[in-house]
Image: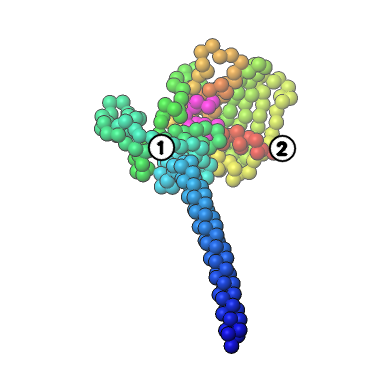
Amino acid sequence: MKFMLKNYFNNNQARIFTALILTGILSVASGLTLVKDATGASANFSLETSNESIKDNIKPSRLPRPVANAVLQDLARTQEISATELQIIDYNQQTWRNGCLELAQPDEICTQALIPGWRIVVSNGKENWTYHTNQTGSVLRRNQKANESTLAPVQIPVSELPPPLDRDVVFRQISSGGLAGRTYETVLLKDGRLIRVRIGDANDSERSVRRVSVQQVQQFVRSLERSKFSKFQNLSYPAPSGAADYITYTLTSQEGTVQYNDISRNNLPKNLQKVVKAWNQLAASAQS
């Protein structure tokens, strides 16, 4: 009996001891797992937080869409440019020193308040315009000095005016000067014929006759009306003093004549530039 009890206690103690050892091992393993998970979670949280902080720190201030729209719409309206041709190429936040956004007109009185806002540069690929706005775009001004450098026109003497157009002629361009010193006359007729001759060509050997559609002629006439070509009547935009070898263009419609040169073309008033562009496009599209 004693032997049996002794064996029972010995076996029972062994089982208890074994259970204690296994429990200890499991506890240690669980502890290590918890520590590992906690450490991993802490590392992941720190990494994500760090990335978010960096992202927020380097992200530039975005131009609000209402401000961008206000600028694009104003430029499209005032310059008669399709908004689809315009693109904002640069912008940055500014704090303007007065209520005129630092673009005061002559004799304009401006409040001396600081105005937070934006400086925005818009381009159509050929020309840039700079705007100053307030923070919401409800107040904006275009920097005329930065964008426009138009020439001061002079009146063409009556003695130098070309003859008026015949009834069937819509438009005429006379070009003269350049290295060759030759003079060419190109006329657009109502029926779409585009006739070009060299003045002084006794044999008329350089005459060319090309055509555009009547619809193109009508579109060109409408572009003259939209650009108010008549307001440039009998005005000349001269070349800079000392310039040489330039070509002078004399444009005549049924409503008047204007003169400019190839050196100063980009400094012409915007509406006159549109007439020149429309005429050149029309001439380029003509077919023999």
Magenta part of the chain:
265-276
**Quadrant of the rendering where the N terminus is positioned:** bottom right
User: How many numbered circles does the render carry?
Assistant: 2
Report the magenta stretch's main SS: helix
Could you say which quadrant of the image residue 283 lies in?
top right
Q: Residue at x 51, y 37 (%)?
A: 89
Q: Residues within 10 Å of mark 1 (few under 14, many from 20)?
A: some
Residue 271 belongs to the span the image colors magenta: yes
Residue 135 spot, x, y in % from top left: 36, 41
Q: Residue at x 34, y 30 (%)?
A: 102
Residue 276 spot, x, y in % from top left: 55, 32
Q: Which mark identifies residue 132?
A: none
Return the residue nearer the eye: 104 or 20.
20
Eye-nearest disc, 2 or 1:
1
Residue 248 spot, x, y in % from top left: 57, 21
Residue 206 belongs to the span the image colors magenta: no
Return the residue nearer the eye: 258 or 150.
150
Residue 224 spot, x, y in % from top left: 50, 37
**Dot 2 or dot 1, earlier in sequence:** 1
Q: Mark 1 = which residue?
A: 93
Whether residue 158 is visible here, answered yes or no, is: no
- Vertical order, 38 against 70 (above or below): below
Q: Residue at x 59, y 77 (%)?
A: 10
Q: Residue at x 44, y 47 (%)?
A: 65
In the picture provided, is 42 more to the left or to the right than 193? left
Q: Residues within 10 Å of mark 2 (few under 14, many from 20)?
A: few
In the picture provided, is 91 more to the left or to the right than 198? left
The colour scheme used to paint the residues is rainbow
Q: Mark 2 = which residue?
A: 288
Could you say which quadrant of the image residue 154 lies in?
top left
Pointer 2 and pointer 1: residues touching (CB < 8 Å)? no
Q: Find the distance from the CA under tag 2 to the CA under tag 1.
A: 54 Å
